[in-house]
Structures are given as C-alpha cells and as structure tokens.
C-alpha cells in the first residue's frame, strides 16, 4: 500500500515539477512512510512527473517505484497489490526483471499486451503507466475501485494523486465546494460517481482507465470492466452452477484461493474480525494458514453493538483453527467522537456514517502490531447480505403470490407491505429510495431550495439491462456506487491514516464473477430470512465457521449514534459550536432552525444497529459536513 502522484505539463520545468511532487508526497506520507521518490520524464513536448511514497510490504529490497523498463523506457507507479504477480511473472519469463515484486509484472504485461493488461490483473490497484513509445500516459484503477485515484486540470497542466490533499498541494488550486453535490450528500450520506465535494476534482471511475495523449494533451476514459450480475454479460469462472452442491464446491475453491494469494507478503499479516460471517470466515482461513495469527476487533459498552463475545465464541468453537491465534481488542465509547475532525480530514470525501469511528479504531489498533490485515468487506455487496436485498427478493416473490401466501411473507417481513406500496418500477429509484437521509421536502427546507427529487448521479449508474432479476439490478447498483464510493473508500482512507494495508478477499474478481452467475435464490434465502445463502451454507459445511456464526443475521458495523449524542455533557465542544455557536460554518448553507429542531427531538428509543435512518443520523451528517467545511473551506 502506497501513495502515487503525477503531473503532466508543457510549462513546468523539471526542478519545479520535482518540488511539487515532493509536496504531494509529503501530504500523503502516511500512505508510504518507509520511502519516497520522484522522477521527471519527457515525451511529445510534455514533461511527465511521477511521485511515489512507499509502505514496504512486498519485495522489501528492490520493490521501490517508479519502475522503468530498460528496453523501451516505459515507467509505472502503482498503489496497491497485484496478488497474482507470481503467476504473471511466470507468463512473462522472457522479460528482464529488476525487482522481485508485483508491480513490475504489471509493467511488462502492459508492454506485452497493451491496455488489455488490466483484464489480467487480480488485485487492488490505482496508478499510471508512462509510455514514451506510444507517447501517452495511462491512468488505471481496479475493478471495484478499492484503491482511489483523483485528478484535476489547471492552466499549468494535469495532476493526479491517491488523495485529494496531495492534489491540492501539487496543483496549487484553492479548494471550492461543489454545490451540486450538497443535495446528493444529504440524500445518500456520500457522493457517488466521478464528482467529489470539491469543485473541479474528480475520481477515475472503478474498472476504468484514462488515456492522455501527450501529443495534443487530449484525454479519454474507458471502462474495461462492468459488474452486471445475472445479465449474461459476465461469464462465470467455470462451468455453469446447476445445484447448491456445485455452488458450494466452486465457492470454497475460489474463496480459499482468494485468501491464499492475499497472504502473499514479506511482512506479517493479521486479520480484522467481528461477530459476522464475513470477517470471521476470512480470519478462519487466514488462521488455518498462519499459526499465531493476530486478530483485531473493537468492542462497545452497549450490548446490542458489542460483538467481542461472539468473536471469542467463534475462536473457542474452532480450537484447531484458532488455537494459536491472538485476539486484541479496543473499547469504542462516546469519547471516540473526539476523533471526528481528524477522520473527516483523512477521509477527504464527505462521508457520514457511524462506521468511520470503529473502522478507524480497529485500524489504529492493528497498525500497532502489523502492516497488513485481511478484512471481510465486499461480501454483502457481491453476495446480497443487506436487509434491503432480502426485502427486494420478498417483494418480487410477493407480486406472484396469492393473498394468503403474501400474508405469510408479510409476517416474516413486517415492512414489506409499505415497501410494496411505494416500490418504484425503476430499479435505480428503488435503490435510491433505500438510501435517503432526507425526503425531498425536508431536503428543500434544509438547503433552502425548491422541492425536487435528487437524481442519482448518472455516472454512478451501471448499464442495467432488460431481463435482469430485480435483485441483480440492485446488486449492480450497489457495486457500482456505494461499494467504491463509500465502503472501500472509507476503508482505504482510514487504514492508510495509520499506514496499514487492508486486503479484501471477497472482492477477488473471480469470486465476484462466480456470484454474478448465481441465480437469485442461491444468494437470498427467504425461508431462512438471510442473505448470502450460498456463503453461509458453504462456510458451515466446509468447517470454516461454526453453525452459530454461519446462521447469525447481519449486524451493521456502526456506533450507537443516538445514545452517544444524547450524552450531551460528554459531547465534544465542536458539536455544540457547529450547531449553536456564533459564526458556525454551517450558516448560509443549511436552515439551522430546522437542524436545531432535529436536535431537540433526538431520541434513542427504538433505535438500534439495524435502524437505517434516524434523527441521530441526520445530525451526524450535519456535524460531518460542518467539520468538512472547517477543514477544507475555511
């Protein structure tokens, strides 16, 4: 895990470019505290600067970047890990290698097959290839957008980096609020798509590459991968799955290998773990491969949020697997709210969900012991683990049932009747509806605008096709927007805040392709009222997790936001200052009378980990935005 940065300019001289690259590296040094380098090259009348800060994980002695081919001068910088580099290097045996790591394999693969090289990589990656032969610079990002890459253009040139702060430092642009993103943020709690909360700063989309022609300075973005489950556009990794038994065998083979290759490292690997099946299954396989594995988790005083006992129960139920493992935990309490300004600064993109706090705390704990951890992120998005997927499956079945059958279904899903009453025939609107923090009328009052439905950003939409199962349509939406722009983005930024690399086996593209080919009934078990059906069945029968863990329902990884906000005497001073203080940065952006009204009616009654939207979530979003304004716009 590292940080990359780059500049393309006709006007900037080498010394100035090097100085700016160093400034960019300094701003993201937490991504790579072990080493740094800058390189300035030229082609087609343009100077191309490449900067790199390194967190040494693999090939400790020779793995520094940028890496330049001795044959043709092609150069690469890459943030992340290419897990199948061992197999790729065997394929490229005729090439001359100067390193023993993963990134040079990607460089020679590009030199061999051109832009198709991305389709052969298995990993998390974002970076750039400078190609003087074809007179171009190619920016690229992994299929699910696990690694971030931002860019902007000014009169001085084109700038890109792993983090927004580095981009600001190198380009010299003044940060400005993207006002178009405000209603989007206060609808979904994050900003999906290519745009960010910063005007003129964009993200390279997941599964995409950008080609910059160094002859005329033109650029174009191309998608090399689109995740469309059930569309028929993505083949599975093997023969079609015709039975649950076939699916079990295929899942276990792919999952085991996904964990195996993610344990390739020249430093110790640990694992994050909670009481859920996703991280538990990853930790179990990792522990079976690495005796003495260190496991990291967080705990809460509030029993409904605390999973420490469940983790201990898992370990005791599989002594042959976890016998030598060491569990370390950190308590997460109301005092953790003090961290919010630092977390907002690190995340950069405006994200408002309580999970940022425990994510940061468990990553800080892990970073005190290891440099690399495995995590369970991605399983819910690929294998349909969230409650909303169960509800959508129930709704699709309900429309084909007689009244008695529908009543039985409504008994298991009390919210189904209301969901059917407002269920939009457009799958994108159904997905959007499930995320809304403020309804259109409330949002209009909050922002002082005309009431309107906030459209989901077009560039965050997958290419849905006719005939896709409604469940698969929602999964495609989830994997195209919320997964890259919230789930793995917050994981990347908060882990790298502590110079920690996080690896996500469930986002191995081979496993995702397998999931894409499964029928909806193998993802969601309506009778058992659980998602990730084939995962649960396979992991229990394969002895990777115990039966209790396999059948445990989904519990969101979040904080007791309402309960903590109601402990007003213990809240950080900045909360009161933002909501009630004179000169609050929120004045002029939000209707503060409305905000204070929400504050006054706050309650923790009936609010728990499964509550999707509450007044506490709305206040948390307001506070996060206020801190973001203070950090970046003041």
Image (cartoon, rainbow, N blue to C red):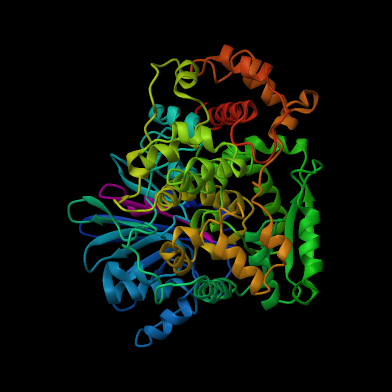
In percent of the image, x 54 and y 63: which residue is there?
506
Could you say where residue 88 lies in the image, as x and y percent from the top left? 41, 79
Residue 443 on the magenta segment: no
- State the residue in front, 246 or 369: 246
In percent of the image, x 53 and y 30: which residue is there?
437
Residue 39 showing in the rendered view: no
Q: Is residue 612 above or below residue 544?
A: above
- State the residue in front, 166 or 350: 350
Q: Which residue lies furthest to the bottom in this view?
A: 94
Name the quadrant containing residue 201: top left
Name the quadrant containing residue 132: bottom left
Could you say where residue 42 lies in the image, as x and y percent from the top left? 28, 60
In percent of the image, x 44 and y 57: which residue is there?
144
- State the residue in front, 516 or 325: 516
Name the quadrant containing residue 105: bottom left
Image label count: 0
Residue 14 on the magenta segment: yes
In percent of the image, x 69 and y 46: which residue is there?
358
Q: In this view, does 75 lie above or below 140?
A: below
**Magenta-drawn segment:** 1-19
């Amino acid at each position: 895990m590292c940080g990359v940065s780059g500049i393309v300019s006709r006007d900037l001289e080498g010394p100035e470019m090097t100085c700016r690259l160093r400034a960019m590296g300094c701003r993201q040094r937490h991504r790579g505290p072990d080493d740094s380098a800058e390189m300035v090259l030229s082609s087609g009348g343009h100077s191309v600067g490449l900067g790199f800060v390194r967190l040494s994980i693999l090939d400790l002695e020779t793995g520094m970047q940028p890496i330049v081919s001795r044959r043709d001068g092609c150069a690469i910088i890459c943030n992340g890990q290419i897990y199948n580099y061992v197999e790729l290097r065997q394929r490229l045996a005729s090439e001359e290698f100067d390193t023993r790591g993963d990134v040079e394999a990607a460089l020679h693969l590009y030199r061999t097959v051109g832009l198709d090289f991305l389709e052969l990589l298995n990993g998390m990656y974002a970076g750039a290839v400078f190609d003087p032969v074809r007179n171009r610079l190619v920016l690229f990002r992994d299929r699910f957008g696990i690694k971030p890459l931002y860019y902007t253009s000014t009169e001085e040139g084109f700038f890109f980096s792993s983090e927004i702060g580095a981009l600001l430092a190198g380009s010299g642009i003044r940060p400005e609020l993207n006002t178009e993103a405000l209603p989007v943020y206060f609808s979904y709690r994050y900003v999906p798509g290519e745009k960010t909360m910063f005007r003129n700063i964009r993200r390279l989309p997941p599964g995409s590459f950008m080609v910059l022609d160094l002859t005329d300075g033109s650029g174009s973005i191309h998608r090399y991968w689109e995740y469309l489950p059930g569309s028929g556009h993505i083949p599975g990794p093997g023969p079609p799955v015709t039975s649950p038994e076939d699916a079990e065998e295929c899942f276990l083979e792919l999952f085991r290998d996904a964990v195996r290759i993610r344990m390739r490292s020249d430093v110790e690997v640990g694992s994050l773990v909670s009481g859920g099946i996703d991280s538990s299954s990853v930790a179990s396989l990792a522990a079976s491969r690495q005796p003495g594995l260190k496991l990291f988790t967080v705990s809460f005083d509030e029993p409904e949020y605390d999973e420490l006992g469940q983790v201990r129960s898992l370990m005791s139920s599989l002594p042959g697997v976890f016998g030598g493992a060491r569990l370390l935990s950190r308590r997460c309490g109301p005092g953790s709210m003090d961290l919010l300004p630092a977390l907002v600064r690190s995340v950069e993109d405006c994200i408002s969900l309580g999970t940022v706090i425990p994510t940061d705390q468990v990553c800080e704990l892990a970073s005190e012991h290891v440099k690399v951890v495995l995590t369970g992120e991605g399983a819910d998005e690929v294998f349909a683990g969230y409650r909303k997927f169960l509800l959508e499956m129930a709704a699709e079945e309900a429309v084909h049932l007689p009244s008695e059958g529908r009543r039985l279904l409504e008994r298991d899903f009390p919210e189904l009747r209301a969901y059917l009453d407002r269920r939009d025939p457009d799958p994108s609107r159904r997905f959007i509806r499930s995320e809304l923090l403020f309804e259109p009328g409330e949002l209009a009052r909050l922002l002082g605008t005309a009431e309107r439905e906030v459209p989901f950003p077009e560039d965050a939409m997958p290419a849905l096709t006719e005939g896709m199962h409604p469940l698969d349509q929602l999964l495609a939406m989830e994997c195209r927007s919320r997964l890259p722009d919230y789930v793995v983005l917050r994981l990347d930024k908060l882990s790298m805040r502590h110079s920690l690399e996080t690896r996500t086996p469930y986002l191995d593209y081979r496993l995702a392709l397998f999931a894409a080919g499964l029928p909806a009934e193998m993802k969601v078990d309506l009778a058992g009222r659980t998602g990730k059906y084939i995962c649960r069945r396979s992991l229990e029968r394969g002895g990777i997790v115990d039966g209790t863990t396999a059948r445990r329902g989904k519990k969101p990884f979040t904080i007791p936001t309402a309960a903590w906000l109601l402990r007003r005497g213990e809240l950080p001073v900045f909360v009161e200052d933002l909501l009630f203080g004179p000169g609050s940065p929120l004045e002029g952006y939000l209707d503060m009378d409305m905000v204070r009204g929400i504050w006054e009616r706050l309650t923790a009654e009936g609010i728990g980990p499964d509550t999707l939207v509450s007044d506490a979530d709305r206040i948390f979003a307001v506070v996060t935005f206020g801190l973001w304004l203070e950090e970046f716009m003041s």
